[in-house]
Amino acid sequence: MKVIRTIDAIKKVIQDYKAQNKQIGFVATMGFLHDGHLQLMRAAKQENDIVVASIFVNPLQFGPNEDFEKYPRNEQKDTQLAEEVGIDVLFMPTAEEMYPQPMIIQMGITRRVDVLCGRSRPGHFDGVLTVVTKLFHLIQPTKAYFGLKDAQQVAVIDALIQDLNFPIALVGLPTVREADGLAKSSRNVYLSETERKEAVSLSKGLQAGKQLLLSGERDPQRIIDEVTKTIELNISGRIDYVELLSYPSLEQVTSVDQPIILATAVFFEHARLIDNLLLDENGSLITRYN
Ligand code: PAF
């Protein structure tokens, strides 16, 4: 595995692969790799000639009171995991390398952000789209893989690819979960023992909503109420949102008759956890987005 830290070096490597007509799969991460990331890498490995992964904790996507400084990092372990999974190139630039001067141009998004995490984290998706655009230009992937745990991120990257005509196929893969249903996340390390036990109620709440949909309920508010009730009963934390929206357009619906996202975010003392289910109009889980 080649470990690359500079923009000049990654450009050269990619140029060589392109000259050989290689199909490049790309997995962008902020590191502290877990099974969710590894699943994306394994899929990219199966479906492409070469896999490039990036690890970069992107300062632009963190708000002033968010966890940029203390975001968990473990470069040594990440390098080992990436190597084991068969990554060909691991791109790990510093913030100075990616942003040698404050950005003059930044991406701005006009729709799909006034809901879910976009509403709670103003500017977050502008920062995500700015770094993803830079990474897409540098890596020039054939296919780019993202986890559906961040389904709003997948929806905005889909818009980025379409609006700016990136010749990239977007692949969204399902959330990987712990045995009790908790969505795997680098931020789970922030939870206390009690909170870790309570955190399972995010997925339990969403499952309760899904069951209602499967049993024929089509009223979004009734489904939202069921999810909210299930979560509220079991946590010491505070619900940020429970929402049901069309997917990927992320608009309000009056009745569930199309693919939807049922999503929640909960504040615990040191962590804000998110989870969602992508469901078709009958309530069945959507397991691959592309
Ligand atoms: O999903 C993430 O880890 C980040 O938002 C991403 C896509 C790597 C951009 O920094």
Image: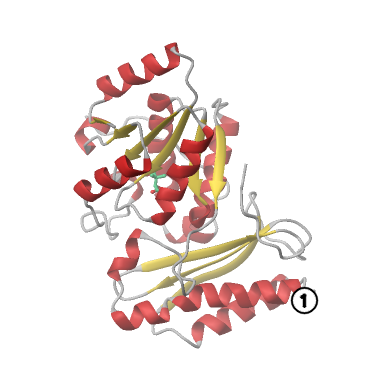
Hey, which quadrant is residue 36 in on the image? bottom left
> Where the C terminus falls, by quadrant?
top right
Q: Position of residue 202 (x, y in %)?
A: 50, 74
Whether residue 35 is visible here, answered yes or no, is yes
**Residue 243, position as x, y percentages in the image:** 59, 67
Mark 1: few/some/many CA within 10 Å (<14, 14-19, 20+): few
Residue under pointer 1: 215
Taking the image as shown, residue 260 lies to the left or right of residue 37, namely right
Count all numbered tags in the image, as a single digit. 1
Image quarter (top left, top right, bottom left or bottom right) of the N terminus: top left
Say what secondary structure mark 1 lies in. Answer: loop
Ligand 1 closer than 8 Å to the CB at disc 1?
A: no
- Quick one: which residue is furthest to the bottom in this view? 233
Depicted 260 relative to depicted 41: above or below = below
- Picture quadrant of residue 192: bottom left
184 to the left or right of 226 = left
The residue lying toward the viewer, choosing from 210 and 258, is: 210
Residue drawn at x 32%, y 54% as measured from the top left: 63
- Please say which color scheme the image uses: secondary structure
Q: Residue at x 44, y 35 (%)?
A: 26
The correct choice, above or below, for 68 with respect to 167 in the image is: below
Visible residue check, residue 99: no
Query: Type of residue at label 1?
Result: Ser
Q: Residue at x 30, y 40 (%)?
A: 83
Taking the image as shown, residue 209 lies to the left or right of residue 145, namely right
Give how far across and how far down residue 76 sits, in percent. 19, 47
Residue 281, x across and y down, in percent: 76, 60
Q: Residue at x 52, y 72 (%)?
A: 203
Residues 148 and 82: in front is 82
